[in-house]
Amino acid sequence: MKNIAVIGAGAMGNGIAHAFAQSGYKVQLVDVNKKALNKALLTISKNLDRMVAKGKIEETTKAETLSNISIFTELSEGVEYASLVIEAATENIDLKLKIFRQLDTACSEDTILATNTSSISITQIAAVTSRPEQVIGMHFMNPVPIMPLVEIIAGYSTSEEVLSFTKDLTEKIGKTPVIVNDYPGFVANRILIPMINEAIETLYSGVAGVQEIDTIMKLGMAHPMGPLELADFIGLDVCLSILEVMYEGFKNPKYAPNPLLINMVQAGKYGIKSGEGFYNYQDNRKATIVASQFS
């Protein structure tokens, strides 16, 4: 296998494309938005420049990595020769099901279909295809070029051969695969996102401010990033989507999204990608947002 197609040129998609291309794989990066594709290539180039500056790779490696990536706006063209397709679109179930229906038609019958979903059922996604045994979850962590973990999720029908193959491939690109079962949020987000939600609840209840909450978790719990800053980094809209999936999947009120999170997303405050969340990123400084504005 040397041809990998990645669907979606956002933060996760360009990171996955980067990781495979740097490991010598030919990558077809697919997105309906040509500007998003060009932005993804620029992001990958800048990330490679940082690696060169730190002495982690040579200039020749940067050139080879970029030469391994081709961009496409037509899904059928981008996946034509792919042995593995990794979907990395927005965390929206309707969109993902639509993409997998298209992939099932456009890809050859032996192509493995993977999703980078961080919470949605692999079994549900696989069910809209004619090849459920060849559908699997590959949940990469952000930023992909740096983070070593890939959460591997087998759906109800995923074959042992596909599971073993995906695990081996993950190791070949220098990542550490950890296999988990197919339940809402899997392991990483089942633990992480409720913690973030509880941090938002703590802010919403007036127990402490943004910086105080983040400082306590960084200095007291040795977290490299506080939960509210991490929420901004992940995207508040993504955090909300994951909570909604878990709330619906488990029917448990402990997964209910906090009202402040809902209001911030409705107000377009998504975090870093919108320029403002719990912190202000528009002027290269961090300014806390008053919870009462959204309560």
Image: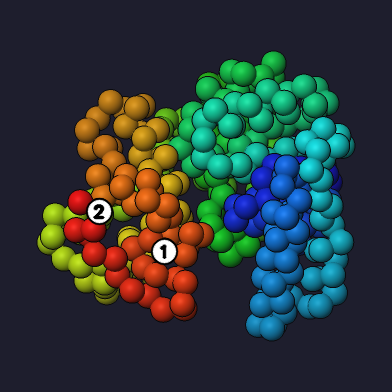
Q: Earlier in the sequence, mark 1 or mark 2?
A: 1
Q: In this orientation, does residue 236 appear?
A: no
Q: Could you say where residue 20 lies in the image, as x and y percent from the top left?
A: 73, 54
Q: Quadrant of residue 262?
A: top left
Q: Could you say where residue 143 lies in the image, as x and y percent from the top left?
A: 56, 61
Q: Nearer the viewer, residue 138 or 266?
A: 266
Q: Residue at x 22, y 37 (%)?
A: 254
Q: Could you say where residue 264 lies in the image, as x and y percent from the top left?
A: 34, 52
Q: How is the image coloured?
A: rainbow
Q: Secondary structure at mark 1?
A: loop
Location of mark 2 (residue): 294
Q: Residue at x 60, y 56 (%)?
A: 11
Q: Could you say where residue 196 lies in the image, as x and y percent from the top left?
A: 31, 53
Q: Secondary structure at mark 2?
A: loop
Q: Quadrant of residue 69?
A: bottom right
Q: Quadrant of residue 228?
A: bottom left
Residue 212 - label: none
- Looking at the image, is 159 positioned above or below residue 171? above
Q: Residues within 10 Å of mark 2 (few under 14, many from 20)?
A: some
- Looking at the image, is 34 positioned above or below residue 55? above
Marks 1 & 2, CB-CB < 8 Å contact: no
Residue 276 - label: 1
Q: In this orientation, does residue 24 appear?
A: yes
Image-based side of 186 in relation to 64, left or right: left
Q: Amino acid at mark 1?
A: Glu
